[in-house]
Image (cartoon, rainbow, N blue to C red):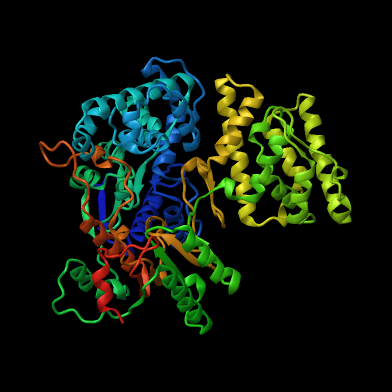
Amino acid sequence: MNKGNKPLWITGESCCGKTRYLAQSIYQWMQIYPLPHKPLILVINHQARENLLREILKLNAQGYLGKIRTPLGLIMEDVNLFYPLICEKLDIKVKIPIRLRPETEQELATQLWQKDITSELISIFGNEYTCVRRILDLTQLAGAAGIPFEKIPDSLQNSDFFQTIGNKSITNLLGELIQKWRNWCLEKGFLNYGLIYELYALYLLPSGEYEQYLLNQYKGLFIDDIDDFPSIITQLCQRFIDNNITSVFTYNETGKVRLGLNADPEYIKEKILPLCNHQVLENKDNQYLKNNLEKPMLKLINGDFEDIETLANISSIITESRAELLSQTCNCILKSIQENKIKPQDIAIIAPGLDEIARYTFQDIFTNQNGVAIQFLKEKRPLVSSAIIRSILSILTLVYSHQGRLVRKDLLPEMLVILSKEKIDLVRANLLVDSCYVPDVNNPSLLDYTNFSRWDRLSYQSRESYQEILALIENIKAEISEGNNHLIAIIDKIIQLFFPNLNELQYNQITNLKEFIETAQHFWEIQYKLGNLTINEIVSQFLTLIRKGTITANPLLEYNQNNSDDSEDNFSSLEGGLLISTIYQYRSHRCRHRWQFWMDTGSRFWSQGLGLFAYEAFLQPIEKNAQTMPRESEDILIRRIVKDLLARAEEKIFLCHSDLSVTGNEQIGKLSPLLAFTS
């Protein structure tokens, strides 16, 4: 790779070797530019980072010692670094910025807009929660597209949304709410994702100081899967290209996983590809399923049934009801595992969405009944669904003053069972709560077990455990009364007293505790900065927030978490568990498996994307005189999904279909024609 050569744009489909080619380019660059020179390497998530590092390691035993960032990670890092410069351009007072987590952002925006959101606006979105969430999503879409917040109403007027409601006053109101939120955040020093994107695109990227920083800091630019990046990345790429700095990009024609979630692949391609040398990578010969089945499958999806034979290596599981489908799918997989045809870690169940019935069925049949480990990929469950977290919340209502209205009496028996390590069974716990709990608005409490008239029915172990729990609760209350009432310190105290040996907990319980503590720290930090609530009010709001179920954590194993870099977890290389995933997460994490089971094949949700509300209004137009890009059709999306998944299946695909959905409706979707041509 010669210094100052023309940028290179590498196009290919999934799993054709683009990342390996990029790794080779980085390795060649490293031979020309030894340390301390370093390139800027960008990938879309943590899994992509792992894949790239693995390829570099094959070429260089020392690997790559520098940082590989996600686009959001780079943007957040540089906005924080140059925040004084940004404040100077905005002519506002410099404050240490705090990034808002989505759930905190939701709460603060709801409070700020409480008097401004009209009933008409709420009726459009269904309820207040969804209304606030959709408006905040608009800021992220606009920021990622480099569109000033004040221009959001103009963008919306060119969208399908505005054509539907036909009311300009609604879009103007949305613009006013967004501007109010933006100004309030800047005044307080709060940054959400949308504002971070906007500050980067409109104030930092055009800055000469920042351009000089980039040129001094990095001597090369390498981006993998640029089709998943936001459109503002084009300005960054052009900075490097204009200064004749080595630049290499890979583009996945069947990727575009994040289209509708702030990615703008067509605009990036339109702007950057003409500036580059173009190389197209062909599909690998060993991609049997993709090379042999892609054309006939796509013909069937398009309704062309001529000259189509039975699809080799494609089997089907067809039932009338969804319950039968789940059962037969599990039995098929278990039989194959027991006959040593395949290992659990070589199987993936892929579905457009996972409802509670499917989740419970898989957990029960695979793990509880047959001991087969399963992994739900990047699944988020509410923290309040964890019994340990509910127990800690119950303790907080008992130790802090004025929390009586938030005590859930029905959850106190569960608290006793959890805190006693099940030395108190649920029946005796209910008897104790019925007789010993004293409700009080200011100071609810649990009395001594002797207040239970038939305490002789309690075992010695139960009595001792109950008394020990009461003593520890009184210990915490005494500490609070002495002034040591910091929420984080009290939560830490509760964990130390009741869960002293974390090694005894399951990994998902530890993950929930970790997320709970991080949420409490963030919530406390925000409320401390606002400074308008007492400690008891902060505790009340925190309890309410957690119980709403908006805070989530992975209920099973979580690997390589790096929240500061907006990374995602690595599951495709894990061993020991059958993978269960949504279509989006499977594609986003670049997974590959020998066998794939496509659940609910006949569902119409297979061809429906996950795009944010009105996302098409913020896609940059690539045709002259066009105001916006049209929303991608279902036909185009399903073709891309099928091509992508075929590339990620090595041996066999099972189409799993039930005539009736979980709600009892008939299922006829874009993939339904495939079912008639399977073995």
Quadrant that contains the C terminus: bottom left
* Side of 32 where 639 appears, left or right: left
Camera-side residue of 642 and 622: 642
The answer to whether residue 576 of the structure is visible from this angle is: no
* Side of 537 where 107 appears, left or right: left
Image coordinates of residue 508 in percent, x first then y, are 61, 54
Image coordinates of residue 268 in percent, x first then y, are 24, 44
> In the picture shown, does residue 527 fall above or below 666?
above
**Farthest residue in the bottom direction?**
339
Image coordinates of residue 502 in percent, x first then y, are 71, 51
How many numbered marks have been drawn onto this rendered protein structure? 0
Camera-side residue of 629 and 479: 479
The answer to whether residue 108 of the structure is visible from this angle is: yes
Q: Residue at x 59, y 24 (%)?
A: 528
> In the picture shown, does residue 59 fall above or below 625?
below
* Side of 112 where 633 appears, left or right: left
> In the picture shown, does residue 412 fall above or below 599?
above
